[in-house]
Image (cartoon, rainbow, N blue to C red):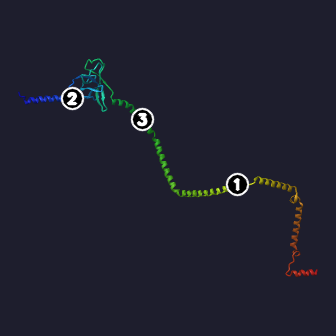
Amino acid sequence: MTIKKEFKVGILAICALLILYFGIDFLKGSDVFNPARKYYVRYDNIDGLTVSNPVMLNGFQVGLVKKIRIRQGEPRPVLLQLEINKEIVLGESARALLSNNGLLGGKMIVLESGKPGTTLGSDTLLAGVTPGFTSMIEDKAQPLVNAVTHLVNNTDKLIDSFGPTVKKLNDALDAVARLSNSANGMVANSQSDLKKITENVQALSKSLITTEEELNKLLKKMNVLGDSLSHADLAGTIHSLHRTTDNLNKTIIALNEGKGSMGKLMKSDSLYRNLNASSASLNALLVDFKANPKRYVHFSVFGAKDKKSKEKGK
């Protein structure tokens, strides 16, 4: 018996459809050769959960989300159909928790198997939501964000309060700049004076050096004098000075008492009277000499002969 070509094509098409159907399920994560049980769970919001998202138990994938339906008007409008491996036994109070799947924001269902030693009496699971890593970060970061916002606001207020101070600081800097310019001008104008002052300072330094040399010489001489004095007989000199002073005192006492020629001269008035008398006689002689000079002076060209003749006439 020969098989017609149309029959062969039909069988091939059916096989292709079956392979396509099971291949799509396999690509979606369904275990074609291991039948699964269907469970249902209701949520208010699935937060981006899609069909084929995994169902996890203890970190191991045991199923996937098969269907998602929306039933408006009901308390929990989102109905999920889950396919879970028949080998997984769920007990009473089993829950399906909506959770985050990694840092990229994916979603998954995490199973809680319920009370051990019991069997779930229906195909409906309790719904729940677990905070994912992103939610935890958001919860932890929110106080930090609030604190940063508060800090930024306080910083803005502080900066605003510094406005007048900044203005005063700018004015001060401008004043310093003007003062610096003035100082530069003064320095430029007084360079010649500074040069003269420098020259005077140099001259003064030289003079001080010379003075220091002279002082050194004087100190050397004083040292020599000090050495000489240290070797001199100061005690004998002082004793001799005392004797001289005593003799002088005795001489002065003798003069005061009128002893000796000088004492008599100082104490007796006879010498004074004699001197006055001699002075009076001398004055009278001078007056007579002026009045009669011929009595005292004889002048002649031939004075010698006249003198002889006069002597003869006598």
Q: Residue furthest left?
A: 1
In the picture of the structure, the residue carrying the numbered disc 1 is 227
Give the class, few, some or many, for how many residues have Cα within 10 Å of label 3's Cα (few <14, many ≥20).
Answer: few
The circle on residue 26 is 2
287 left or right, relative to 45: right
The circle on residue 151 is 3
In the figure, residue 289 lies in which quadrant?
A: bottom right
Q: Nearer the viewer, residue 247 or 230?
A: 230
- Residue at position x 88%, y 62% from top? 271
Mark found first going from the N terminus, 1 or 2: 2
State the separation of the CA atoms marked 3 and 1. Answer: 86 Å
> Label 3's element?
helix
Q: Amino acid at mark 2?
A: Phe
State the separation of the CA atoms marked 1 and 2. Answer: 127 Å
In the figure, residue 296 lies in which quadrant?
A: bottom right
- Residue at position x 17%, y 29% from top? 19
Instruction: Kindly report which numbered mark, 3 or 2, lies closer to the viewer in this rendering.
Output: 2
Q: Look at the picture and state if 44 lies above or below 154.
A: above
Q: Nearer the viewer, residue 63 or 2?
A: 2
Mark found first going from the N terminus, 3 or 1: 3
Q: Look at the picture and state if 259 lies above or below 32.
A: below
Give the x, y percent position of residue 153.
41, 36
Q: Amino acid at mark 3?
A: Leu
- Residue at position x 14%, y 29% from top? 15
> Would residue 71 be visible to someone looking at this image?
no
